[in-house]
């Protein structure tokens, strides 16, 4: 009966065979770089290919000193290292110690040639770039219907904004007829009047992504009236579609984030703005109430009716003061009048007449105070307390004055 070996034993045996082969322990291989990836650990994983075959290769971070340039897709390189078996996977690969650049591959040369031609035509010019709408409601997607790209776009769109409508055009993204299918998808969705288009696929080698380097796809994107976001491959992959598109996204997931605004974040921001607005309105309302109260008190202070009441009260007080002043003046005037009346009464002829004296006037009614004012034969009137006496002067007898200016009677 034949011996039965485990998988690990077979892989270990093959590894020993590779290790004993002197030619494989130090070998130099020429080929075109494809599917190149820089790992976060510092290792570089890539594939060497020629017209009929491919060879997996890796350069560990510790060997990076043997690389003096940036390894990129399409480069023609000469790699020195050893071929060995990775026991866990049972696959052999080239472990590179030194990589030298020999030239550029045919595909890369075609890429550069078309890129330069389209750039000279102005198809990459920024003035032709359309802005991506901030609040898109309908998003068209041109990609494979079964790839990881559409699943990532759907998941992120549903998470960011479940109200956005996705319209998928299931296009071929690799192989024969892929470029024509992508261009047809762009033109079809453009006629639907959507808000924005996402054109792309997941990562791969330069051969896998070549459909997005075709001129027919570039012209379809350039002629598209709808803003286009390109999302081809990984962040390090660059295609002609990226240059022509209105916006380049490093991955399909990033394209979905750029095309679909985050509704939940928007709602959170809106609620915060609403709360801030309500607080501001409350502060302004409170300030308005305070100012209204101040104005009310100020108006109350300057109220015309209040002013009128004050003027009326002041007028009443003034009137009372005038009355008191007039009464005081009347009282003083009455007192002075009484005094003057008393003095006048004392000088009144009638008062003297009432005491036995008489008042003598001539015929014309003029008072006679001297005998020289009349003569014998003239008529005079003598007024006494109970009437008057008409008389005629028979004789006038004047009095003699003494040395001390006193008057003496001749009787």
Image: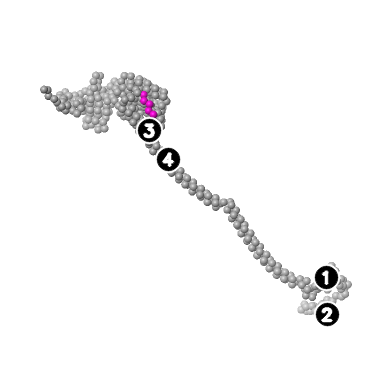
Q: Which residue is mark 4?
A: 274
Q: Nearer the viewer, residue 22 or 273?
A: 273
Q: Nearer the viewer, mark 1 or mark 2?
A: 1
Q: Which residue is mark 2?
A: 410
Q: Nearer the viewer, residue 293 or 53?
A: 293
What quarter of the picture does the N terminus occupy? top left
Q: CB under 8 Å between callouts 3 and 2? A: no
Percent x, y of residue 85? 18, 26
Q: Is residue 241 shown in magenta? A: no
Question: Residue 361's mark?
Answer: 1
Q: Nearer the viewer, residue 369 or 324?
A: 324
Of callouts 1 and 2, the N-terminal one = 1
Q: CB under 8 Å between callouts 4 and 2? A: no
Percent x, y of residue 219? 38, 22
Residue at image coords 29%, 22%: 207
Residue at image coords 22%, 26%: 57
Q: Secondary structure at mark 3?
A: loop
């Amino acid at each position: 009966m034949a011996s039965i070996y485990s998988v690990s034993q077979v892989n270990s045996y093959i590894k020993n065979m590779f290790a004993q082969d002197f030619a494989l322990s130090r070998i130099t291989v020429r080929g075109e770089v494809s599917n190149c990836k820089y790992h976060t650990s510092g290792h570089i994983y890539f594939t060497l290919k020629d017209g009929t075959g491919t060879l997996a290769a890796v350069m560990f971070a510790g060997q990076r000193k043997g690389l003096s340039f940036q390894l990129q897709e399409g480069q023609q390189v000469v790699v020195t290292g050893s071929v060995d078996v990775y026991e866990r996977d049972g696959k052999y690969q080239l472990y590179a110690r030194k990589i030298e650049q020999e030239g550029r591959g045919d595909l890369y040369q075609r890429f550069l040639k078309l890129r330069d031609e389209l750039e000279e035509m102005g198809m990459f010019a920024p003035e032709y770039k359309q802005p991506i709408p901030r609040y898109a409601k309908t998003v068209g997607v041109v990609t494979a219907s079964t790839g990881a790209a559409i699943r990532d776009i759907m998941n992120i769109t549903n998470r960011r904004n479940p109200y956005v409508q996705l319209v998928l055009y299931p296009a071929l993204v690799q192989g024969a007829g892929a470029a024509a299918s992508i261009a047809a998808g762009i033109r079809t969705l453009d006629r639907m009047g959507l808000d924005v288009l996402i054109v792309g696929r997941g990562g791969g080698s330069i051969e896998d992504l070549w459909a997005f380097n075709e001129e027919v796809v570039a012209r379809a994107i350039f002629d598209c009236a709808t803003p286009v976001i390109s999302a081809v491959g990984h962040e390090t992959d660059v295609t002609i579609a990226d240059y022509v598109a209105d916006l380049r996204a490093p991955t399909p997931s990033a394209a979905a984030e750029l095309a679909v605004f985050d509704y939940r974040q928007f709602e959170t921001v809106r609620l915060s703005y609403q709360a801030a607005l309500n607080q501001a309105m409350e502060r302004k309302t409170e300030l308005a109430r305070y100012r209204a109260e101040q104005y009310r008190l100020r108006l109350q202070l300057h109220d015309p009716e209040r002013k009128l009441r004050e003027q009326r009260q002041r007028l009443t007080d003034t009137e009372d003061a005038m009355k008191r002043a007039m009464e005081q003046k009347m009282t003083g005037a009455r007192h002075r009048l009484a005094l003057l009346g008393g003095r006048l009464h004392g000088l009144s002829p009638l008062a003297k007449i009432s005491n036995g004296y008489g008042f003598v006037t001539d015929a014309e009614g003029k008072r006679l105070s001297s005998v020289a004012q009349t003569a014998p034969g003239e008529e005079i009137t003598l007024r006494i307390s109970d009437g008057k006496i008409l008389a005629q002067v028979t004789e006038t007898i004047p009095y003699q004055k003494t040395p001390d200016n006193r008057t003496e009677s001749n009787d």
